[in-house]
């Protein structure tokens, strides 16, 4: 065990080192890296755990209304950001590689679900990018984490 500031900290397991590398790679992805123009959301900053209100601009072609507020139902579990996920990983509060996989994929699946709820043609390109990001994160985890894959999905 490693001792930091008088507190014994256990050695990181192989999957935890891989999970840290996965988070670094995700943060450099063009759809996630906030320094790039292609970033689609802020997945890194901590987010509020309450229903999100989004203002959707509606063009004059669709009835002439200026804006419409819509409440978006949150999915369970509540949304998670990459900073909180990293904090939990460093605090050893994630049980195993499967739990990490579920959480990191959940970050992006939740964003995809919330975006799809808007049912706007203007958001179709964003939905496509989010689908690509979910696929990227899944494959990254499959390549780097020691997780079992259910061969008989329901």
Image: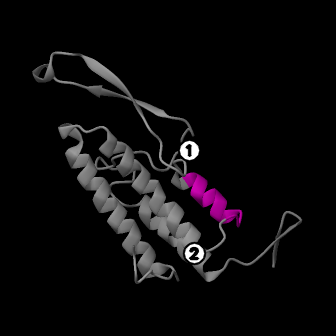
Depth check: 109 or 129 in front?
Answer: 109
- Asked if the residue at tag 2 contacts the one at tag 1, i.e. Cβ–Cβ closer than 8 Å, the answer is no
Question: Residue at coordinates 33% horizontally, 49% vertically from top-left?
Answer: 39
Q: How is the image coloured?
A: one colour
Q: Is residue 123 above or below residue 112?
A: above
Say left or right for 15 vs 140: right
Q: Secondary structure at mark 1?
A: loop
Question: Residue at coordinates 51% horizontally, 71% vertically from top-left?
Answer: 21
Main secondary-structure element of the magenta-colored stretch: helix
Depth check: 123 or 46 in front?
Answer: 123
- Does the stretch in magenta take in 86? yes
Q: Secondary structure at mark 2?
A: helix
The residue wearing badge 2 is 97
Looking at the image, can residue 135 be seen?
A: yes
Q: Is residue 89 above or below residue 96?
A: above
**What separation in Å lies between label 1 and label 2 (alpha carbons)?**
22 Å
Q: Residue furthest front?
A: 154
What are the residue bounds of the magenta stretch? 83-93
Foreground disc of the pair 1, 2: 2
Q: Quadrant of the N terminus?
A: bottom right
The residue wearing badge 1 is 46
Say left or right for 149 vs 99: left
x and y, in percent, of residue 23 in the image = 50, 64
x and y, in percent, of residue 18 in the image = 54, 76
């Amino acid at each position: 065990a490693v001792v930091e500031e008088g507190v014994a900290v256990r050695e990181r397991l192989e999957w935890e080192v891989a999970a840290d590398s996965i988070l670094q790679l995700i943060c450099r992805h063009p759809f996630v890296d906030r320094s790039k123009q292609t970033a689609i959301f802020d997945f890194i900053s901590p987010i509020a755990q309450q229903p999100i209100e989004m203002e959707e601009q509606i063009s004059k072609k669709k009835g002439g209304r200026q804006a419409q507020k819509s409440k978006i139902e949150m999915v369970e579990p509540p949304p998670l950001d990459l900073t909180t996920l990293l904090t939990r990983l460093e605090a050893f509060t994630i049980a195993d590689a499967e739990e990490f996989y579920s959480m990191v994929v959940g970050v992006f699946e939740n964003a995809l679900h919330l975006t799809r709820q808007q049912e706007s043609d203007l958001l179709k390109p964003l939905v496509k990018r989010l689908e690509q990001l979910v696929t990227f994160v899944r494959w990254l985890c499959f390549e780097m984490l020691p997780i079992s894959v259910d061969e008989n999905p329901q």
